[in-house]
Image (spheres, rainbow, N blue to C red):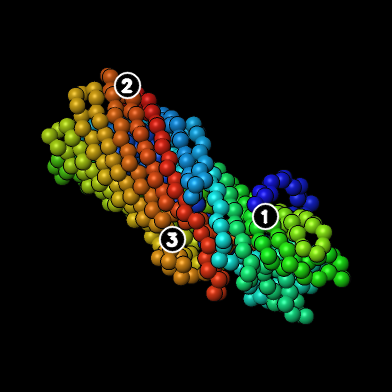
Amino acid sequence: MKKITLVAVALTSLALTANAQYNYEYAFDNLPLIQNELRGTSRYQSMAGAFGALGGDLSAIVHNPGGIGVYRTGDLGITLSLDFNSSKTGTYSESQTRFRVNNFGYAGAFKLSSETMPNINWSFTYNRLASYDRRYHGVVRNLPTSVTNYIADAMTDNEDATADNMTAKSGFNPFWNGNAPWNQILAYNNYLAIPTNSAGTKFAGLGFDGVTADGEFEVIERGHNDEFAITLGGNLVNTLYWGVGVGINEFLHERTQYYGESLYNTEVYTKPDDASATLDNGNADLGYNNWTRTTGLGYNFKFGIILKPVNEFRFGIAFHTPTFYKMRQRGWTELNTAFAPENGTNYKLSDYSPEYVNDFKLRTPWRFIGSIAGVIGGKGIISADYEYVANTATRVRQWYDDNYYHGDHEIESTTSDIKNYFSPNHIIRVGAEYRINPSWSIRAGYSYQTASASADVRDNKVNVVTSGSATGYAYDRSTQYITAGFGYKYNNFYIDLAYVHKYRLNNYHLFPSYGDLPTVYDEVKDHNNRISASLGFRF
């Protein structure tokens, strides 16, 4: 299959802003926005983030704000990392290396004269919660159906998808100017969805008995979720440590999706844009390029405590409110096609959608973390965390701020999709540390996270709705971390090193199932390795 090169298109003159909710109201568009990774200080990472009952760390105090109360001295530190990311799909693999600043911050400890509350502490920290840099591609041979069938079936069920609406580009046409699914418009105008009745309301794709088809996909993602947090806390009689925090999140997610298909022994038009055109046996190549860029700012609050009834045991509880984002998404879609009829001249077509701009509000899931830790012989620590992420509580609201309307409202179809498509995350973290001597410590940890998609989605029992211009969607089936590291302390100076191996198993669906059409997906395996170093000074 010839891969069609993504080209930059100047689309500003065609910007579509009116009533453009079609392109962002779907659940899987927002899945990357609610996923966090294991990142932070090297000590925190090397113990797999199992710090909810420990505290005293610049990342742990964001994990459980109660950890700010553990500090007895000030702490100033920074964490740098080198990420080696690789993704494999079948026999195809992609890799990239990135340098990161995962964390920096300051914690101040202020001693009080009270025996009831010996100190009040505060901190300012930066933490990278997630990095979205990834690239993967694959080829699926002998497809059981075609993306053109999926699009044609969706058009048949869409009362606005008529031949007249999809060719009219001006006036008050609700299909073109409103909730426009551009994969349908482009497919119709590029002869991939063929009318089967005189009214132009029923359509058929190019895949049918006797046709063979191969599919190719490529996904390029980049972006991050960064949080700047201020935390305040203290302790009561050196037994109960408490903390509250507020976080400001800055978000960027950019994604380029390519999906191409080659169909052999299908039916194609012999003479495009000609009244005498007829359908003839031949071959067809198509390639969709879809680009989206989502940016936003949000805020959240965190509350936590650590209880130390005796020196050997600690218990921690933390609650994170949802992050309340204001988001803006921009995007466009391009379609390139090439046809080779047996009894005609080969020809190529190309078309693209206007660039759209969508403004929306996102409420991410709330999180609960329960933790326990034990101190063994004054030299060893074993800790464990359980985190619950209420993905089904995610909400999306459309909002306007223009000359005609100011306000927002919940998108009910997206709320319903989120409840059907998502399931809560259950995250288990365990970590251990052993102090060899006053200067040297060694650490290790393990973390496991369940899938964000519901069982019905994973078992292909529901027809997933994608955004108006993209056909592909992905979700994680499971994520695991294996971690190790060591620390060195000299007087007030410390250095911690960590190694983190992340294994993530994904399903990438080339396009959704629809009606009786089968779903088509490929398995993507991520093996990411990270080496990080934290440098700090306590005073």
- Residue 78 vs 317, above or below: the answer is above
Q: Find disc 1 in the rendering and name its residue.
A: 287
User: Dot 3: few (<14), some (14–19), or many (≥20) neighbours within 10 Å?
Assistant: many
Residue 62 spot, x, y in % from top left: 37, 42
Earlier residue among tags 2 and 1? 1
Q: Find disc 2 in the rendering and name its residue.
A: 493
Residue 453 circle label: 3
Choose between 280 and 392: the one closer to the eye.
280
Residue 7 spot, x, y in % from top left: 71, 46
Q: Is residue 264 visible?
A: yes
Three-letter residue code for mark 1: Gly
Earlier residue among tags 1 and 3? 1
Which of labels 2 and 1 is toward the front? Answer: 1
Q: Secondary structure at mark 2?
A: strand
Earlier residue among tags 3 and 2? 3
Q: Residue furthest bottom?
A: 198
Choose between 46 and 347: the one closer to the eye.
347
